[in-house]
Image (tube, rainbow, N blue to C red):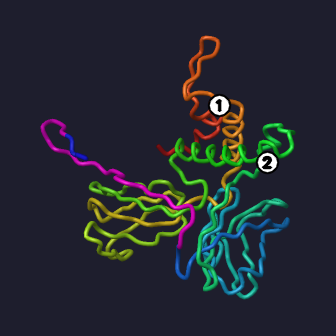
Amino acid sequence: MNLNTYYDNTKVKFNAVLDCKFSDQGTGGTNGAVALNVSSNSGTTIQSDGLIGATVYLVFIDGIQYASTDAFTTGKQFIFDPTTGTITVSIAMVAGTSCTVFYTSSATSTVAATEPVTLDEAKAYCKIDTGTTDDDILNELIVAAREQCEDFTGISIIVRTVTTVLNNTCGNIYLPYCPLISLTSVTDQDGNVLMVDDDYKLSGTMFPQLVFPKWDRLTLVYNAGYGIPPSRIKTAILQQTFYLYENRGESAVISRSGMVAELTLSPQAKATLQRFRRV
């Protein structure tokens, strides 16, 4: 691929994503990483015996990322006590609010990847009361709808391992298919492993930029995705699942009453996802 172009007879180079590979489950972080879904009480603390002795490095609440800190100052922060497995969040959480905790421990080895929409939720949204007849179809459509929402927005909804090859000629290229959970490795085109701060620098948290090095064919491996996505993303997946269910068996392009439409993403899902789109 020739990524050079000319402007006023001057060759100009651009940043580019050359390749991107995904794995729905993958090893990440020191001693592995795992995601834990929990529900809060009406206060600001979350407690789980499974977190005792672990290292918590990221918390999502309704798709909003909270960063760890030793003391609250301002912003989206949390404090973790590994002795009791208690997380204190800097906001007053609503009773029943779900959140996802990403943590590392010697007993964990994989990042969990689950669909954010359940079969029961899809059946309720689509008002399907045919028993279990269409369950297999709906399970497949939920996955297809989520993937189409990811393609439209350019983000990772489920947790996955991303391997991407970047041309960072101009610097500050955005990492694709985030939000970022943890960065596993950065290597140059010769396979040399780069070290943080000395050899490379990221700017930002959820959707970071690679500030330097300004090199081509850098390979980055990282864990990305939402634990529990924002409610609007979940709504869009339900809208798209219903759209695919209602139009199953149709060709990719349909014509009805003089109107021609492509069976890609439904207008309702597009409108819901517009604010999350990064492509």
Is 246 on the left-hand or right-hand side of 23?
right
- Marking on residue 249: 1
Q: How far apart are marks 2 and 1 (CA)?
A: 23 Å
Q: In which quarter of the image is residue 242?
A: top right
The residue under the point 77% across, 46% down is 135
Q: Nearer the viewer, residue 175 or 254?
A: 254
Magenta residues, dominant SS class: strand
Please state if 180 lies on the left or on the right of 238 as rendered. left
Q: Does the magenta stretch include residue 24?
A: yes
Secondary structure, mark 1, is: loop
Q: Residue at 53% of width from left, 51% of height from top?
A: 155
Where, by quadrant of the figure, is residue 62 drawn?
Answer: bottom right
Q: Magenta stretch?
A: 6-27
Q: Where is residue 190 in the image (x, y as percent from the top left)?
A: 25, 70
Callout 2: SS: helix
Q: Does the magenta stretch include residue 102?
A: no
Quadrant of the rendered structure where residue 197 is?
Answer: bottom left
In the displayed image of the protein, which residue is found farthest to the left? 9
Ranked by sequence position, the earlier of labels 2 and 1 is: 2
Q: Where is residue 67 in the image (x, y as percent from the top left)?
A: 60, 69
Please, what is the three-letter code of the amino acid marked with disc 2? Glu
Q: Where is residue 158 in the image (x, y as percent from the top left)?
A: 61, 57
Q: Residues within 10 Å of mark 2 (few under 14, many from 20)?
A: few
Q: Identify residue type, mark 1.
A: Gly
* Front residue of 253 and 97: 253
Return the residue at label 2.
121
**In the rendered view, would you say 216 is above or below 31?**
above
